Image (cartoon, rainbow, N blue to C red):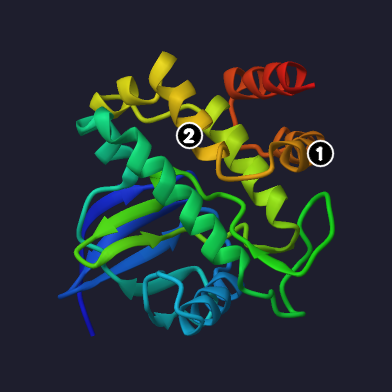
């Protein structure tokens, strides 16, 4: 068994620590159980979709030991190479399309808005995509659900257009014209009219997320008005 190492990253509700060779330990800060999330990750990995391998989960579900993905996030790539927006937008769209080809098991919870049997991530944005040695790997499956793939696309649209991004070099890559270009290039691979139908329910659901700040909520409302 590995030993707890230094803090590698912090998300909105969990921390990631080094945990021996090739592993990390993800720890919930609010004692949230990740048992369902681990089950979904195992299922998705069995379908050939790129997710970290799960090694162990604590009895209470609050600590998850999994494969360490060495490489930058897509957000970091965009910050360092903003000229790669087109290829990264295509990669993001392709991950959506690949995921939505997987039928969701009956035990997965229903997504907000829309109906369907596709597996959805519901937080699939550049900071949850790691570019590892063998290609992209999708992390943070806490919101995964069963529903209409257009709901997933609509939520990514909302997050790309409205969510804050970490401070530093990556910030400039997703602000202003660059952010707008990323959104436009991502959405061109989908039926925009169908995606727009899902926007109201997606925004209503995301506005209840305590992790979103007031600026992000205001930006979501503005996006909804512009998209009408």
Quadrant including the C terminus? top right
Q: Which residue is mark 1?
A: 197
Residue found at x 19% / y 64%: 133
Rendering coords of residue 125 (x, y %)? 48, 44
Q: Tell me if 159 is positioned left or right of 7 in this view.
A: right
Q: Tell me if 24 is positioned left or right of 6 in this view.
A: right
Q: Which residue is mark 2?
A: 185
* Residue most extreme to the left: 21
Residue found at x 33% / y 67%: 25
Q: Tell me if 216 is positioned left or right of 7 in this view.
A: right
- Under circle 1, the secondary element is helix
Numbered circle sitting on residue 77? none
Rendering coords of residue 120 (x, y %)? 64, 60
Residue found at x 65% / y 37%: 210
- Under circle 2, the secondary element is helix
Q: Is residue 151 visible?
A: yes
Q: Is residue 31 visible?
A: no
Quadrant of the rendered image containing residue 3: bottom left
Q: Tell me if 33 is positioned left or right of 176 in this view.
A: right
Residue found at x 56% / y 38%: 188
Q: Nearer the viewer, residue 8 or 155?
A: 155
């Amino acid at each position: 068994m590995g030993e707890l190492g230094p803090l590698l990253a912090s998300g909105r509700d969990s921390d990631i620590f080094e945990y021996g060779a090739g592993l990390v330990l993800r720890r919930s800060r609010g004692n949230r159980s990740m048992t369902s999330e681990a089950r979904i990750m195992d299922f998705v990995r069995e379908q050939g979709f790129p997710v970290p391998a799960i090694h162990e989960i604590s009895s209470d579900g609050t600590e998850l030991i999994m494969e360490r993905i060495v490489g930058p996030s897509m957000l970091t790539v965009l910050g360092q190479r903003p000229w790669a927006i087109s290829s990264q937008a295509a990669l993001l769209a392709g991950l959506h399309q690949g995921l939505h080809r997987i039928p969701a098991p009956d035990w997965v919870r229903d997504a907000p808005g829309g109906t369907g049997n596709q597996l959805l991530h519901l937080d699939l944005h550049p900071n949850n995509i790691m570019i590892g040695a063998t290609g992209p790997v999708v992390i943070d499956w806490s919101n995964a659900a069963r529903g209409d793939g257009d709901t997933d696309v609509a939520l990514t649209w909302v997050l790309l257009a409205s969510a804050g991004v970490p401070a530093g070099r990556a910030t400039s890559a997703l602000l202003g014209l660059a952010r707008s270009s990323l959104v436009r290039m991502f959405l061109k691979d989908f039926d925009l009219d169908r995606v727009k139908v899902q926007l109201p329910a997606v925004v209503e659901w995301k506005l209840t997320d305590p992790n979103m700040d007031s600026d992000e909520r205001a930006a979501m409302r503005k996006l909804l008005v512009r998209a009408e």
